[in-house]
Amino acid sequence: MQYKTGGVIKEGDHVLIENKKTPAIVEKVIDSREVTDEFGVNEFGVLLTAAPFGSVFWPESEDNDPLIFVARGVDK
């Protein structure tokens, strides 16, 4: 999966959600049918950890509020 700017989304990346208001960390890239089944979602996206919410699924189809890349985290 890629950010709207073209960079590859990687586990551990630091990102912003909610129109750049909320920091989050990419915990899992969900980019295959096997992984969608494992996590009980019906589309590709990413599983994030965001302090005010805990775990958040952010669908790849979210065009109005895309993930904003901040920095690479530790490779998992």
Image (cartoon, rainbow, N blue to C red):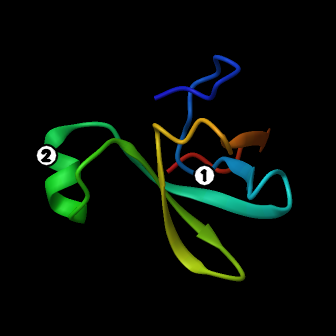
**Label 2: which residue?**
34
Which quadrant of the structure image shows residue 68?
A: top right
Helix, strand or loop at disc 2?
Answer: helix
Neighbourhood count class around disc 1 (C-alpha, 10 Å): few under 14, some 14–19, many 20 upward: many
Query: Disc 2 residue type?
Result: Glu
Asked whether, in this view, residue 32 is left or right of residue 73, the answer is left
Asked whether, in this view, residue 39 is left or right of residue 23, the answer is left
Which quadrant of the structure image shows residue 45?
A: top left
Residue at the farthest top position: 6
Which quadrant of the structure image shows residue 53?
A: bottom right
Residue 14 x/y as whole percent: 73, 51
Mark 1 or mark 2: whose residue is earlier in sequence: 1
- Of 38 and 44, nearer the camera is 44
- Of 10 and 24, nearer the camera is 24
Is residue 51 at all visible to an observer of this figure? yes
Is residue 71 at all visible to an observer of this figure? no
Query: Disc 1 residue type?
Result: Gly
Residue at the farthest right position: 21
**Could you tell me which residue is drawn at 46 percent across and 37 percent down?**
61
Label placed on residue 41: none
**Could you tell me which residue is drawn at 56 percent across and 34 percent down?**
9
**Label 1: which residue?**
12
**Could you tell me which residue is drawn at 54 percent across and 26 percent down?**
2
Residue 72 x/y as whole percent: 72, 41
Structural distance between the alpha carbons of marks 1 and 2 = 21 Å
Helix, strand or loop at disc 1?
Answer: loop
Residue 60 x/y as whole percent: 46, 39
For the image, the number of numbered tags is: 2
Q: Do the residues labelled 1 and 2 touch (CB within 8 Å)?
A: no
Asked whether, in this view, residue 46 is left or right of residue 37, the answer is right
Neighbourhood count class around disc 2 (C-alpha, 10 Å): few under 14, some 14–19, many 20 upward: few
